[in-house]
Amino acid sequence: MIFLLSDLHLPNTPSSLRDRFLAFLAGPAREAEAVYILGDLFEVWIGDAEGLSDHAAEADALRALRDSGVKLYFQHGNRDFLLGRRYAERAGLELLADPVVVALDGSPTLLSHGDRWCSDDLAYQRWRRFSRKPLTQFIFRSLPKRLRVQLAGAARGQSDRDKARKPAAIMDVNGDAIRDAFTSSGVRRIIHGHTHRPARHRLDIDGVACERIVLADWRASRCEVLALRDGQFTALSLLA
């Protein structure tokens, strides 16, 4: 069995979401062959030193799961793209490129956080390109913690304001971008998160039947992971 999840947005303060994630790692995840986390596991990430302090419980639980024989993979999201090798090594996470083709149950599948395909949101894509530059990240990491906290808070506030005023369609994936992703990668299945619009979409790409699966975001009323077993996908709720 394989589990895939994204957009948990775990805060650095006590939270029921954090409790459910830890319960998942200690429970259902132990039955898996692999767990894929496709970004935005954490709500904010200003550096590995702070992450190792704020999210030590998650690091320890992930490491324990990895040590039990479950393979753990992590892609960066737009909230935790600064998560580095120091935290990944402590947690036993293998960092994946975005996007990346992996064989899930023998079927080549393109995995991504998904924000790269929201190409209609031009302002966000400019920010994404700027924030992913190594020089930008080096400068940010070199700043005092207090300033990094302030900048991260300002960025989240601006993001929330942008979401409130932008048309919903702009913040979803672009159809042409998805078509290009299918054709360039040669896969018939894409799995991603980011949009907070969980669904399974059937598409026809140049006469080939394809599928795009959008993972669910976590909230008080919904905590679920996508399970793949014997070629079948099912949503596993962790609220029960």
Image (cartoon, grey):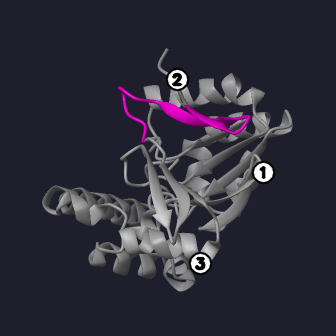
Q: Position of residue 31 (x, y in %)?
A: 76, 27
Image mark for residue 184: 3
Near mark 2 (Cα within 10 A), the count class, few <14, some 14-19 or many ≥20, is: some
Seen as rendered, the residue at the extreme front is 207
Using the numbered discs, state the Cα–Cα distance from disc 2 to disc 3 in whole angstroms: 35 Å
Identify the amino acid type marked 3. Ser
**Mark 1, residue position:** 106
Taking the spot 29% from the left edge, 74% from the top edge, the residue there is: 120
Using the numbered discs, state the Cα–Cα distance from disc 1 to disc 3 in whole angstroms: 20 Å
Label 2 with label 3: CB-CB less than 8 Å: no
**Mark 2, residue position:** 238
The residue nearer to you, when weighing 205 against 237, is 205
Seen as rendered, the residue at the extreme left is 165
Using the image, determine if residue 175 lies above or below residue 203. Answer: below
Report if residue 232 lies within the magenta region: yes
Where residue 58 sits, quadrant-wise, is top right
